[in-house]
Image (cartoon, rainbow, N blue to C red):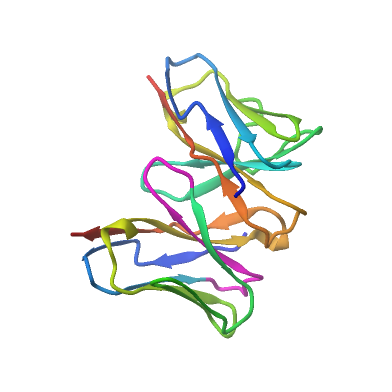
Amino acid sequence: TQLLEQSPQFLSIQEGENLTVYCNSSSVFSSLQWYRQEPGEGPVLLVTVVTGGEVKKLKRLTFQFGDARKDSSLHITAAQPGDTGLYLCAEPQGGSEKLVFGKGMKLTVNP
Amino acid sequence: GAVVSQHPSWVICKSGTSVKIECRSLDFQATTMFWYRQFPKQSLMLMATSNEGSKATYEQGVEKDKFLINHASLTLSTLTVTSAHPEDSSFYICSARTGRSSYNSPLHFGNGTRLTVT
């Protein structure tokens, strides 16, 4: 089973600051998905990246997939309190339907 | 968009009793559903893959006799925690894919069930 390492694991910032969270693996990702989970709810898919070097934007969120497809990053610009949550990266296990999740990055944005 | 509904959203039970959690795909059919468990401040751990009309596939270390899964229709999977103990207290989340089965297709999650065993 591929292990996904996320960093940092916790981040508490002020509204308006920028931040980046990373997801790394020792093996090549077939594809990678980013989810956001709010307390007491299930994760919600933010984006799927498939191609090495790919960059996707979702409003203030920018997702990058490393050229070698072994790492990915999520950058949030001008964070807002509504961005508070657990950010998880996930990868299909061995090309199967099963998703393996990283440990997540718990983000708190203070007003 | 695709909606996955879980019920109940929270449950408190006494040690030794059994609890059933339902997972429904409201506007699509799901031949496969996935059950995850999430402990506080931790990530989601896959427990089992629920297959409509056949036996569930359990991940290593998950007791199939303790966590009974029944996927009786294309829109309903149930997870029964039998003889629950305090260490089974956790957040249980189900998920399902829409459309043709593909590891790149979106996985839609229910809102989870918070189980507390006293």
Asked if residue A32 lies in the magenta stretch, the reply is yes
Q: Residue at x 59, y 48 (%)?
A: B108
Q: Which residue is drawn at 35% across and 61% down?
A: A9
Relative horizontal placement of residue B49, taking residue A39 as reference (left or right): right
Q: Horizontal and vertical percent for residue A16?
A: 23, 71
Instruction: Determine whether B28 is above or below B83 in the image.
Output: below
Q: Which quadrant of the view contains residue B6?
A: top right
Asked if residue A7 lies in the magenta stretch, the reply is no
Magenta part, dominant SS: loop
Is the C terminus of chain A in the top left, top right, bottom left or bottom right quadrant?
Answer: bottom left
Q: Nearer the viewer, residue B83 or B90?
A: B90
**Which range is magenta?**
A25-42
Q: Which quadrant of the view contains residue A105?
A: bottom left
Relative horizontal placement of residue A69, taking residue A64 as reference (left or right): right
Q: Horizontal and vertical percent for residue B36?
A: 55, 42
Q: Which of B21 and A8 is in front in this view?
A: B21
Q: Horizontal and vertical percent for residue A78?
A: 28, 72
Instruction: Determine whether A93 is above or below A39 in the image.
Output: below
Is the N terminus of chain A in the top left, top right, bottom left or bottom right quadrant?
Answer: bottom right
Instruction: Determine whether B63 is above or below A45 in the image.
Output: above
Q: How many marks?
A: 0
Q: Residue at x 71, y 63 (%)?
A: A95
Q: Which residue is drawn at 29% across and 74% down?
A: A18
Relative horizontal placement of residue B111, taking residue B29 as reference (left or right): left
